[in-house]
Image (cartoon, grey):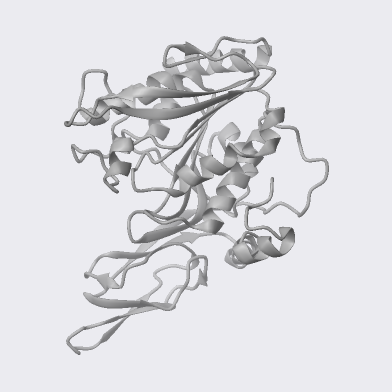
Amino acid sequence: MQAAAHARGREARVDTGMPNEFFVGGEQIPLRSHRLIELQLPPLYIHSPLTIPVHVMRGARDGPRLFISAAIHGDELNGTEIIRRLLKQTTLKRLRGTLVAVPIVNVYGLLNHSRYLPDRRDLNRSFPGSEKGSLAGRVANLFMTEIVHNCTHGIDLHTGAIHRSNLPQIRANLDDPETLQLAESFGVPVLLNANLRDGSLREAAAEDGIPMLLYEAGEALRFDEIAIRAGVKGIVNVMRSLGMLPPLKTRRKKPYEPFIARSSTWVRATASGLFRKVCALGSRVKRGDVLGLIDDPLGGGEFEVNATASGIVIGCTEIPLVHEGEALFHIARFEDVRQVAGHVESFQSDLSPEELLGQTGKEEPPIF
């Protein structure tokens, strides 16, 4: 009932086209403006103040209100760089509606190079939070109150965990037609129909009736150039789909056809030891293929790691020290694995730094 009410309110705000008031942190942001708002957080125990930086950019006309969030896990940095580059895109001068960009949500974790908050809680398992709850609950409540409740759509930017890389992918509730349309417009080959997790931002947004995408790409504490460029391009694509930016007059290339994974599975270490990968991220594999080898460092033998299913490798470990049972590869299953593999290969090639440097003669990525 509550979600339906929020959805009706969201539709009313978008459909009227009337200039509605927009407040963040108690400050009203008018149309045709770009403001940096700092939301106050509980200070550090040495009394150093902390804030969540929020960029609010409003177009000449009201319309969809899209939030982009990054570093909910404090060690996931790709999203912060994606937002920095997004805000430099000249096409935003033609913005309709409101863009709310939050480059660092978990400021505490970022300061400590940590996924978690100082109380060891996972912020993405603490939503919608509470004004008088734990530190994680208070940060989550602040973000919901000031950002999510004021928006109509959302994109949350993530990476793999520390020492784990993810292929650029969208995770979302693809059973919802509006969310599916946004996921397809993002422009990555792999879509995962992911269940909502208790306490996640996606679950809390869904309770508010807000369609939301989760973009996963790269590794914690590392910049991944392909993942960053795909993220900037994907967000711009979604904004065009929502009517927040004008459509491209001519397409430079045929858009990537997204494929929805029917399911996914983890391949785990068969023994403890030193691990050598023989299969790269994005590779097409068949059930039984050798993905890597585990060597006993004391010379006790060599053990194969075999694919337990056919599909595309969408996640893998990046550290050669493994224990028996540890997750090494994440394989997504598709109806037509061969076709998906071809699209993934083209996608990675087109967004590689060498390819874009050859197209533009500059190191900075092109405007999308």
Where is residue 237, by image quadrant? top right
- Residue 140: x, y in percent? 32, 27
Q: Is residue 154 above or below residue 274?
A: above
Q: Position of residue 279 (x, y in %)?
A: 45, 74
Q: Quadrant of the N terminus?
A: top left
- The residue that appears at 61% across and 68% down in the rendered structure is 338
Q: Position of residue 37 (x, y in %)?
A: 45, 22
Horizontal side of residue 34 vs 301, given as left or right: right
Q: Quadrant of residue 148?
A: top left
Viewport quadrant of the C terminus: top right
Whether 75 is drawn above or below 35: the answer is: below
Classify 112 as above or below 145.
below
Q: Residue at x 62, y 44 (%)?
A: 184
- In the image, 33 versus 341, the foreground residue is 33
Q: Is residue 169 visible?
A: yes
User: Would you say 177 lies left or right of 276 here?
Assistant: right
Residue 218 location in percent, x, y? 45, 56
